[in-house]
Image: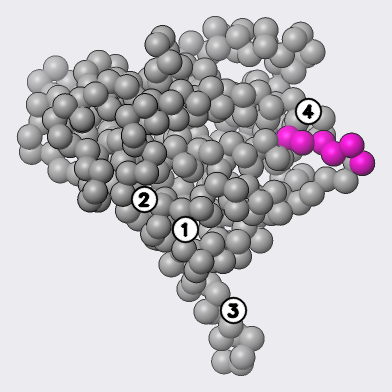
Amino acid sequence: MGVKGKAAAAILILLLFLGSLWLQGGLDYHWDSCIKAYNQVNQLHQLSNSSGGDGAESQLQMCPGQAFQVSLLLSHLLAAPTSKSDVLLQPYLSSWDELMKFMDSLGPMVGLISKEIETKTSIIRQLTKLTEGNPEAELGPDQHSINSVQTQGGTKNKASLDTGPYRSVRSMILMELDQGLVSFHHLTDSGCRTLLRLHRALLWLKLFLEKLAETPAEGRLRSPSDLCREAYKSTLAHHHTWYVRKAAELAFIALPERSFFFRLVCVQNQEELSKLLSRVVQAIEEVYDRTQKALEENGMLDLP
């Protein structure tokens, strides 16, 4: 094998290692679809009203041939905020289910990151199952055991997220603090620590989509690769080592061109993409801000 071949192989191994460790133990310092059917009519009506009647609601239809559906993502995001500045965990996790499909569509390297995020969402779902009186359950990323729990009354699919301590962000925080499940000094698999890692990743995706929605005054559109790398430097890079940062930037080089994103959400041009993504960003921001406030009030923004 020549020098170039060896270099390419080394880069591939490095990227694969990055994907496997991206979220292993958290998005702080390590290398680090089951969608609930909400009332689509009501959610799309809300989005139509927020669009100012500019006709953008036509973009909220299901996009044929795509695993990722922006209409479902918006629906889940809008269902998450609840009273008292809280966030419901079931639609929050369902939003991540859709965001993982979004990341999977961007290529194998970003798709590896989504697998680690899936592990994090699975931990919260598993913790929910444990609080429902199933002492034999063990923490782990087994999505099937998490999403489908056999009971005497039949199969319970995520039903426990509708009630109980893991109903919302704030109810989870209060319960885990009361039960001493959160450590401010050691690594744990608590729901709060896991949520913090998802929370940091959500900021990265929000900023990337926000940049992708921008239409510069001079008309020059930057590549999604540059935008994603810039969003990363402003967010997750602060929690990663130098080696992780360099490997991540290398991984983002393989992101598809802008025209791919037009097809992904079934729009024709940058103007339509900007309108749609701006609404997605607004919905993400509401969920993010509420989660940020809850974590900050309880001193959980720097959990190990």
Magenta: main secondary structure: loop
Q: x, y percentage for residue 215?
A: 82, 36
The reply to whether the C-beta atoms of the residues labelled 2 and 4 are less than 8 Å apart is: no
Left or right of residue 41, residue 146 in this image: left
Q: Which residue is drawn at the image coordinates 46% and 48% (left, top)? A: 114
Q: x, y percentage for residue 141?
A: 28, 46
What residue range appears in magenta? 213-218
Q: x, y percentage for residue 87?
A: 40, 20
Q: As shown in the figure, which amino acid type bears the numbered disc 3?
A: Ala
Q: As shown in the figure, which amino acid type bears the numbered disc 1?
A: His
Disc 2/disc 1 C-alpha distance (Å) = 10 Å
Residue sitting nearer the eye, 148 or 226: 226
Disc 2/disc 4 C-alpha distance (Å) = 35 Å
Q: Nearer the viewer, mark 2 or mark 1?
A: 1
Q: Earlier in the sequence, mark 3 or mark 2?
A: 3
Q: Earlier in the sequence, mark 2 or mark 1?
A: 2
Disc 1/disc 3 C-alpha distance (Å) = 24 Å
Q: Which residue is drawn at the image coordinates 58% and 83% (left, top)? A: 7
Which residue position holds label 4? 272
Q: As shown in the figure, which amino acid type bears the numbered disc 4?
A: Glu
Which residue position holds label 3? 8
* SS at mark 2 in the image: loop
